[in-house]
């Protein structure tokens, strides 16, 4: 019998294999100082494009004041226990009512975290005879929720309505054959990697041909899209057709927690059957009161959303004018697509951070196919015109270096916390890959 740890010691995984050179810099970096468009990274100020602080609420004075006062009054322990047993409060229920009202749903349930919340919601709603039809680009939390599902699941090509209809036909045929079960379709309001909105209106229209319920993960649309900021469903005019609306507080609200909104009887069922909440401690009171304040500001200060979109459009138009490929984004999420390997991407990121004071995050293999690089820029309401102009110039300069092969190094730059070495980057740039 093998030691179960042995395989972990021999194979650190596709990302973990780089940890000895990457930890603390390319992976698990430490941004310090107040949350803002500018923060400190390894002793220097950088422009940050990696925080989902869309509306700039994370360090807003009114938010800081509310969080501080709530913590002073209640501490972080109150209320103790799971909500079903001893952890409920009038503030938790008030937040649920206000979220339901904002999303034009009958009821809502608070969730401690978005990731485990939607996983557990899928588990609560779907039984072994039920079939799930979902978009191929669904977030990892949805995929992991489907791993818990004991029934069948069919995936449709990303935003491909012809394929979605094909999978609904398969799901319907299976339901009729087994004589039990129903269909749940899952998509996203905004796909967080590419920034394109899910075709929810088109999916809702398919209800005329098929019988199913629709669950939408609108983590990136909540607070950023729609006339009032209620999300992608509001923006597309199909909120009524979304049966279960999910979002997290971790983005526009710059907080912790999530919620699920829908018909009262269904939310009640979930409330009494969702394992991740029944067997977990309630959200601390300062978090709940802070979220009430954030929701109030989101609803009553449209200027924050307007500034976010001004910045997003300025950034995106500037990138396109310089010849960058930003895909089909129709949200504030701004991907930048390039060609290159992991080492080239890492060297480019390092150049941006060290020589241009721009902190941006990249996505590389195995998250995306080999030979591709995606920068994922997240504009916010607190970025300035100057931040955008500096960033555009930096991207233009480093893209020229990438195309010229200046980032083709022999190995991944070594910038791990325990081996930082002044001047290392300059030395490695002078040493191109052997050909």
Image (cartoon, rainbow, N blue to C red):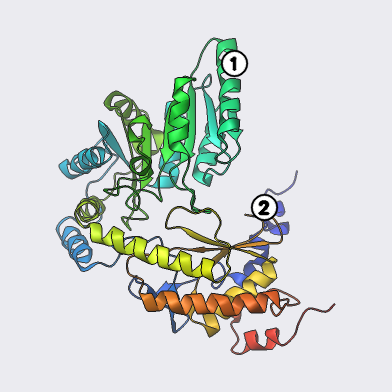
Q: Nearer the viewer, residue 309 or 412?
A: 309
Q: Left or right: where does residue 282 sit relative to residue 97?
A: right
Residue 388 picture location, percent across and down: 43, 74
Q: Quadrant of residue 207?
A: top left
Q: Nearer the viewer, residue 316 or 223?
A: 316
Q: Can residue 88 be seen in this snapshot?
A: no
Vertical position of residue 13 compared to residue 237: above or below: below
The image quadrant where one finds the C terminus is bottom right
Q: Left or right: where does residue 341 sit relative to residue 257?
A: right
Q: Left or right: where does residue 364 sit relative to residue 141?
A: right
What residue occupies the far front of the structure in this picture?
Answer: 321
Q: Nearer the viewer, residue 92 or 197?
A: 197
The image quadrant where one finds the N terminus is top right
Residue 126 picture location, percent across and down: 47, 26
User: Which secondary structure, mark 1?
Assistant: helix
Q: Quadrant of residue 76?
A: bottom left
Mark 1 crowd level (few <14, some 14–19, many ≥20, 10 Å Cα): few
Mark 2 crowd level (few <14, some 14–19, many ≥20, 10 Å Cα): few
Kindly identify the residue that appears in the image at 60 percent across and 11 percent down: 177
Q: Quadrant of residue 246?
A: top left
State the residue position of label 2: 5
User: Which secondary structure, mark 2?
Assistant: loop
Residue 223 picture location, percent across and down: 32, 51
Vertical position of residue 404 compared to residue 79: above or below: below
Q: Name the front one of labels 2 and 1.
A: 1
Dot 2 and dot 1 residues touching (CB under 8 Å): no
Residue 343 picture location, percent across and down: 69, 71
State the residue position of label 1: 173
């Amino acid at each position: 019998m093998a030691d179960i740890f042995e395989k972990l010691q021999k194979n650190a995984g596709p990302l973990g294999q780089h940890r000895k050179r990457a930890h603390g810099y390319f992976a698990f970096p430490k941004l310090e100082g107040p949350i803002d468009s500018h923060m400190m990274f390894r002793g220097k100020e950088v422009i940050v494009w990696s925080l989902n602080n869309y509306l700039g609420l994370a360090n807003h004075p009114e938010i800081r004041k509310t969080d501080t006062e709530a913590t002073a009054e209640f501490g972080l322990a109150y209320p103790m226990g799971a909500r079903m047993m001893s952890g409920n409060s009038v503030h938790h229920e008030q937040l649920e009512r206000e979220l339901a009202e904002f999303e034009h749903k009958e009821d809502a349930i608070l969730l401690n975290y978005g990731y485990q919340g939607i996983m557990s919601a899928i588990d609560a709603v779907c039984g072994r005879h039920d079939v799930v039809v979902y978009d191929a680009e669904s977030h990892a939390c949805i995929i992991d929720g489907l791993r818990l599902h004991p029934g069948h699941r069919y995936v449709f090509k990303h935003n491909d309505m012809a394929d979605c209809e094909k999978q609904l036909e398969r799901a319907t045929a299976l339901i009729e054959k087994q004589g039990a079960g129903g269909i749940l379709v899952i998509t996203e309001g905004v796909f967080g990697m590419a920034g394109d909105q899910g075709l929810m209106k088109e999916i809702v229209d398919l209800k005329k041909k098929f019988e199913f319920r629709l669950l939408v993960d609108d983590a990136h649309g909540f607070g950023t899209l729609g006339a009032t900021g209620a999300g992608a469903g509001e923006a597309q005019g199909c909120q009524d057709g979304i049966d279960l609306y999910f979002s997290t507080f971790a983005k526009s609200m710059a907080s912790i927690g999530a919620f699920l909104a829908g018909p009262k009887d269904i939310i009640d069922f979930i409330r009494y059957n969702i394992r991740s909440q029944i067997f977990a401690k309630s959200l601390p009171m300062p978090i709940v009161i802070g979220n009430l304040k954030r929701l109030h500001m989101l609803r009553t200060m449209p200027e924050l959303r307007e500034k976010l979109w001004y910045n997003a459009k300025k950034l995106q138009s500037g990138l396109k004018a310089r010849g960058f490929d930003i895909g089909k984004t129709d949200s504030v999420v701004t991907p930048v697509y390039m060609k290159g390997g992991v080492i080239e991407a890492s060297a480019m990121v390092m150049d941006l951070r060290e020589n241009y004071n721009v902190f941006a995050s990249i996505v590389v293999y195995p998250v995306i196919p080999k030979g591709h690089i995606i920068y994922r820029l997240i504009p916010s309401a607190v970025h300035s015109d100057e931040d955008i102009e500096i960033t555009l110039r930096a991207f233009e300069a480093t893209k020229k270096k990438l195309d010229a092969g200046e980032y083709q190094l022999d190995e991944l730059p070594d910038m791990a916390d325990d081996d930082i070495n002044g001047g290392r980057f300059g030395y490695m740039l002078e040493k191109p890959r052997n050909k």
